[in-house]
Amino acid sequence: MDSAPTTPETPPATAPRPAPRRPIARRAFLAGSLSVVLAAGGTAWWAADRFLIPHVEVTDVTAYEAEHASVAVTATPEAAATTLTDTSYSNGSTSVTLSTVTTDTLTYFVADVVLGDATDLRSAFANNQFGENITQTTSEIAAANGAVFAINGDYYGFRSTGIEIRNGVVYRDEGARQGLAFSTDGHVEVYDETQTTAAELVASGVWNTLSFGPAIVENGQVVDGIDSVEIDTNVGNHSIQGDQPRTAVGVIDDNHLVFVVVDGRQEGYSEGVTLPGLADILLSLGATTAYNLDGGGSSTMYFNGRVVNSPSNGGERGTSDILYVAG
């Protein structure tokens, strides 16, 4: 799909920053498109209700998870030594290491994450609420949850389907597509949402799920056909094909993940990458499984209080959720 109120700070020196571009938010685009058909009455109201008006299902996610969580979060021991630099973080068991790759036409950002415990990778929702059309920027959600590292998630709030399990709690059980499941034992795998239920996944130890896709690497190979797959090509949404900004997660081993954010749609700086090209990047980083997340203007990587990449809208765009490591 095509997010803070503040302009992202300068990326690392290895990533030259392009000239600022005028922000174009998805919600503004939708509002403009829908106003054109306002005279259509019921149709226009349906579209506004479906894509613009917030529908809150859980008003306080923190309290909801405290009541419903099936897994206790492992706290970092107070005696653990914590180190933090411009490109790395470690608390003695979990570590995050950032790097930047720049070519003539492409810039992307890599976070190598080793988890001391699988539950150190958490999810958070915009405004601490669950529902449709609820948004904040990645950096706002990250700051509200004490994250040292974060990326945008699957933008679950733009759709009403998918299995959404976050921090061991079931929020949605409408299997529709290929999902990604993170288990409490550190194992991560692609699965078919239509062949299971959220309750079965939680019972088997699943901690978080993502519902976007497609899977781009499986068994150490680029998945066939990803150059023609489309995800959620509905009102106000770009095709995910061609050179685009991207966000993806790759699995190197249990409790060893790699996150990639690719900048795009910025001529002279970074044009973006195709899904097969994204798969190649993940393979080069050692991933044997990789999964595509919400991209376009949503693609954002946050570390130690700042956005490290250059979102394609000229600034961050609101999204519904993040994955993060707490500082």
Image (cartoon, rainbow, N blue to C red):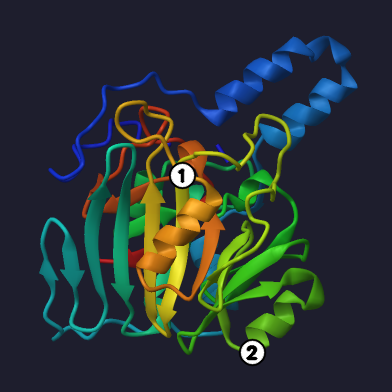
Residue in the picture at 71% in, 61% down: 162
User: Image check: 116 left or right of 41?
Assistant: left
Residue in the picture at 28% in, 30% down: 7
Q: Quadrant of the C terminus?
A: bottom left
Residue in the picture at 22% in, 58% down: 99
Quadrant position of residue 192: bottom right
- Estimate the x, y position of residue 225 in percent, counting from the top left: 68, 57
Few, some or many C-alpha atoms within 10 Å of disc 2 (few <14, some 14-19, many ≥20)? Answer: few
Residue in the picture at 74% in, 11% down: 36
Mark 1 and mark 2: span between their CA atoms? Answer: 36 Å
Q: Quadrant of the N terminus?
A: top right
- Estimate the x, y position of residue 207 in percent, counting from the top left: 54, 78
Mark seen at residue 95: none
- Estimate the x, y position of residue 195 in percent, counting from the top left: 80, 76
Query: Looking at the picture, which amino acid does disc 2 mark?
Result: Ser
User: Image check: 223 left or right of 253?
Assistant: right
Query: Looking at the picture, which amino acid does disc 1 mark?
Result: Val
Question: Does any portion of residue 125 appear in the rendered image?
Answer: no
Circle 1 or circle 2, nearest the eye: 1
Q: Determine the secondary structure under disc 1.
A: loop
Q: Mark 1 or mark 2, which has the lower sequence index? A: 2
User: Image check: 38 left or right of 273?
Assistant: right
Q: Nearer the viewer, residue 211 or 272?
A: 272
In the rendered image, which residue does mark 1 sit on?
273
Quadrant position of residue 151: bottom left
Few, some or many C-alpha atoms within 10 Å of disc 1 (few <14, some 14-19, many ≥20)? Answer: many
Q: Determine the secondary structure under disc 2.
A: loop
Examine the rendered structure and indicate whether residue 38 appears above or below residue 227: above
- Estimate the x, y position of residue 265 in percent, counting from the top left: 43, 31
Q: Nearer the viewer, residue 285 or 51?
A: 285
In the rendered image, which residue does mark 2 sit on?
204
